[in-house]
Amino acid sequence: MSENTVQYSKRSRERAIKDFLRQFLGHGGAQLGIVCLIFFFVLAAVPNILVGPLQTAIN
């Protein structure tokens, strides 16, 4: 492959990724899903800080 072809494929790949993200994040349901995933990931990452007080309040 020539150098021009490599540059073209990198540009088209970047453009394709940007177009995909723009289309994906343009839907409200996708944004809500991403927010929920981030929220539950944070809860799973630091359960002692975030989930511990909830468990003691329930018990």
Image: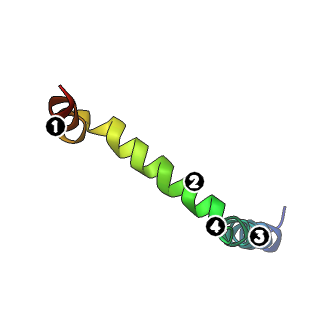
Q: Which secondary structure lies at badge 4? A: helix
Q: Which secondary structure lies at badge 3? A: helix
**Residue nearest the observer in this picture, 57 or 38:** 57
Report the Cα–Cα distance between label 4 and label 2: 9 Å
- Residue linked to disc 1: 53
The mark closer to the camera, 3 or 4, is 4
Report the Cα–Cα distance between label 4 and label 1: 32 Å
Q: Are marks 3 and 1 in contact (CB under 8 Å)?
A: no
- Horizontal and vertical percent for residue 25? 64, 67
Mark linked to residue 3: 3
| Mark 3 or 1, nearer chain start | 3
Report the Cα–Cα distance between label 2 and label 3: 40 Å
Q: Which secondary structure lies at badge 2? A: helix
Report the Cα–Cα distance between label 3 and label 1: 58 Å
Mark linked to residue 28: 4
Name which residue lies at 58% across and 63% down. 31
Report the Cα–Cα distance between label 1 and label 2: 25 Å
Name which residue lies at 17% across and 25% down. 59
**Mark 3 crowdedness (10 Å alpha carbons): few <14, some 14-19, many ≥20:** few
| Residue 29 placement: quadrant | bottom right
The mark closer to the camera, 1 or 2, is 1
**Mark 2 crowdedness (10 Å alpha carbons): few <14, some 14-19, many ≥20:** few
Name which residue lies at 74% across and 65% down. 13
Mark linked to residue 14: none
Name which residue lies at 48% across and 57% down. 35
- Horizontal and vertical percent for residue 26? 67, 72
Mark linked to residue 33: 2
- Horizontal and vertical percent for residue 54? 22, 37
| Residue 19 placement: quadrant | bottom right
Q: Hey, what amino acid is under mark 4? A: Gly
| Mark 1 or 2, nearer chain start | 2
